[in-house]
Amino acid sequence: MEKMNSSGLARTKSDQSVVETVLAAAFKSPTSSEAVGASVESGGALSRKSSRRMMAVSPGRSGSSSRNAHIRKSRSAQMKLDFDEVSSGAALSRASSASLGFSFSFTGFTVPPDEIADSKPFSDDDIPEDLEAGTRRPRLQTEPTLPIYLKFTEVTYKVTLKGMRTTEEKEILNGISGSVNPGEVLALMGPSGSGKTTLLNLLGGRLIQPTVGGLVTYNDQPYSKFLKSRIGFVTQDDVLFAHLTVKETLTYAALLRLPKTLTREQKEKRAIDVIYELGLERCQDTMIGGSFVRGVSGGERKRVSIGNEIIINPSLLFLDEPTSGLDSTTALRTVQMLHDIAEAGKTVLTTIHQPSSRLFHKFDKLILLGKGSLLYFGKASEAMVYFSSIGCSPLIAMNPAEFLLDLANGNLHDVSVPSELEDKVQMGNSDAEIQNGKPSPAVVHEYLVEAYETRVAENEKKKLLIPIPLDEDVKLKVSYPKRQWGASWWEQYSILFWRGIKERRHEYFSWLRITQVLSTAFILGLLWWQSDSNSPKGVQEQAGLLFFIGVFWGFFPVFTAIFTFPQERAMLSKERAADMYRLSAYFVARTTSDLPLDLVLPVLFLLVVYFMAGLRLSAGPFFLSLLTVFLCIVAAQGLGLAIGATLMDLKRATTLASVTVMTFMLAGGFFVQKVPIFISWIRYLSFNYHTFKLLLKVQYEHITPTINGMRIDNGITEVSALVAMVFGYRLLAYLSLRRMKLQSGA
């Protein structure tokens, strides 16, 4: 026991001597990181073992065993006692160092965290794993990027509301002006419906419509398509593929978005770097998850969304309510991450609904919106001073963000009423202007808008006229007219093809779908067990089986393909707005990646049905029947894609598909042999009709030339019709997606 105590005391004294050495160097040159590093070296090179003992002293360092926790607590107490003795009662202020693992500074000096971090005596192995564990990660995105100064003057936006009889215009934004520079975080605050998201979309180039007014410039240049490769835009909803892992999601984003000058290995390494920068290494092999799939947590999903955008090292980063749905600690980490990104020379704009007081003080600039009007623009730290100057001060201690949101809503509870507003209300003496002895929200809003216009607006507008301190060459870079694709068309197709297979393999090979297909196959096999094709009655019965096979594999793919584009609409809009790939590459990859998955189950289906029902037992007829079913599936899939892409609404698409498939089935040549002339053209549009004729030809061409009044010919007409449907329906779907893209303004 004494031996243990003496060894523990020796270790504590060893740790204390290292700390005293660092402190002595700090007293000599408190602002020099070199002095700190030299003092550490003079005290002896720190070994990995001693560095870990130092890290164990830190209160933030967590361990796995209770015994180690007890040792750390006792050492922390001993260290606190030693510090108290050395400082002789001087107050300790907070100056944290991520590399040393403890915090110290004495009255009269503070060692800057960056300078302490420069003299890093420990290896990267000592960096904790998770961002949410409470320890700072390495600095984000420190490589240089093109600086972009964003200015917007008198920005307006209107939408047209079409009613049954009248059409009216609603003003969403009314004369918003402001600016944000590299290295700054601008927060857009305001109550719901105040126009925050609309302003963010407009500044990010997501709203390019005739109803947009005012002037928005990037380095004094107008918006250009080149900026899409320089802008990162994080939407409020985390639009991610549920079945891809974190690593796969970021890797595919890197392969598609990073410039062509980088090799595939460099792009993949960049994805891994972002994973470690965001503290996602612990969950990198976990699926993202969604409504029906268990995956990562909300905070991790939000960080993946941010990683998708910062992976391109953007000059401008827009975020729409990045803290929604997160607890206060995770929200603080997220905002701190944005602050670190901005410090690397990037321009960050974010909307935020109701931040905590700690979050509020992290912002450099603030825009406060109310009903689409500007109530305040300036430094976030000066917002309370400004509102106090116009007579609006909180009567109780409250979060500044809550106070500002109350003002934006016109709520003056627990807020002093400005004398000008009291006089105005007394002069008006109207019940509409007074509520519970306070001015009405409309009166408060009008006063705040007027106060900003008269006291601050002119000053801020003059600042916007000051030229940007950049060379003309740098300014003109943002006006480059051409888009910059991160990969060639073939590379985009290949990446999207494999991404599509990885994402949908879980859905296609789910036990539910396999059970559905195989159970149907066994039921058919039992109903037509070893049926006889030598008699006319047996041929008639087998014809019913063949018709059902054509109907089943026409119906099934249609209702699977209908969901393709409506379900991926949000993802398609997001990725196309960022110019991740060409629409043609996406469309071809999306339609072809389904084929390997769609053609596996029909093989299992036919292997069961064909031999149980006793159809023509020969290799040629079997494979020809299989090819006919494949052709039917691809044609039916094209119809589903066209309906889904044209309507982009699942209810309407399902209704139209039901009517269409039922019509094609009835006109398929089995139920009605003699169709009236004026409606007989429908059967030639029916893939069921052509599939049925081909299956009859394969099975009975050697027996009879006519079955059920249908003449069996060489089959060229039927094959040509199905091939025309395969390409015709897909062309219609592609043109519909093009039209959707133009309407969305992406």
Image (cartoon, rainbow, N blue to C red):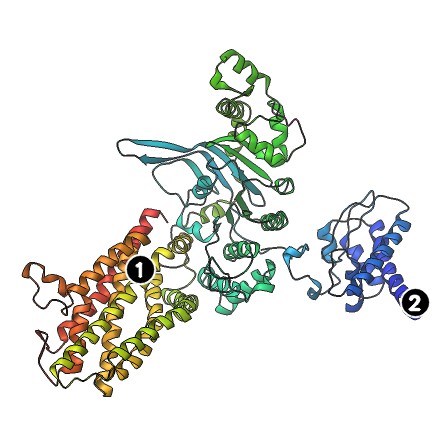
Q: How far is the residue under mark 1 from the one under mark 2?
A: 75 Å
Picture quarter containing residue 568? bottom left
Picture quarter containing residue 139? bottom right
Front position in the image: 185 or 505: 505
Report the span colored magenta.
392-396
Amino acid beneath label 1: Ile
Which circle, 1 or 2, is nearer the viewer?
1
- The residue identified by callout 2 is 6
- The residue identified by callout 1 is 562
Residue shown at 33% from the left, 35% from the top: 161
Measuring from the top left, give residue 497's x and y in whole percent.
Answer: 38, 68
Total numbered labels placed on residues in the image: 2
Residue 394 colored in magenta in the image: yes
Residue 643 colored in magenta in the image: no
Q: Can residue 648 be seen in this view?
A: no
Measuring from the top left, give residue 567's x and y in whole percent.
Answer: 37, 57
- Determine whether the residue tagged by mark 1 lies in a helix, strand or loop: loop
Picture quarter with the N terminus:
bottom right
Measuring from the top left, give residue 61's x and y in whole percent.
Answer: 74, 59
Residue shown at 45% from the left, 63% from the top: 260
- Determine whether the residue tagged by mark 2 lies in a helix, strand or loop: helix
Within 10 angstroms of label 1, few (less than 14), some, or many (20 or more) residues?
many
Measuring from the top left, give residue 162's x and y in whole percent.
Answer: 30, 35
Q: Can residue 158 be seen in this view?
A: yes
Within 10 angstroms of label 2, few (less than 14), some, or many (20 or more) residues?
few
Front position in the image: 423 or 742: 423
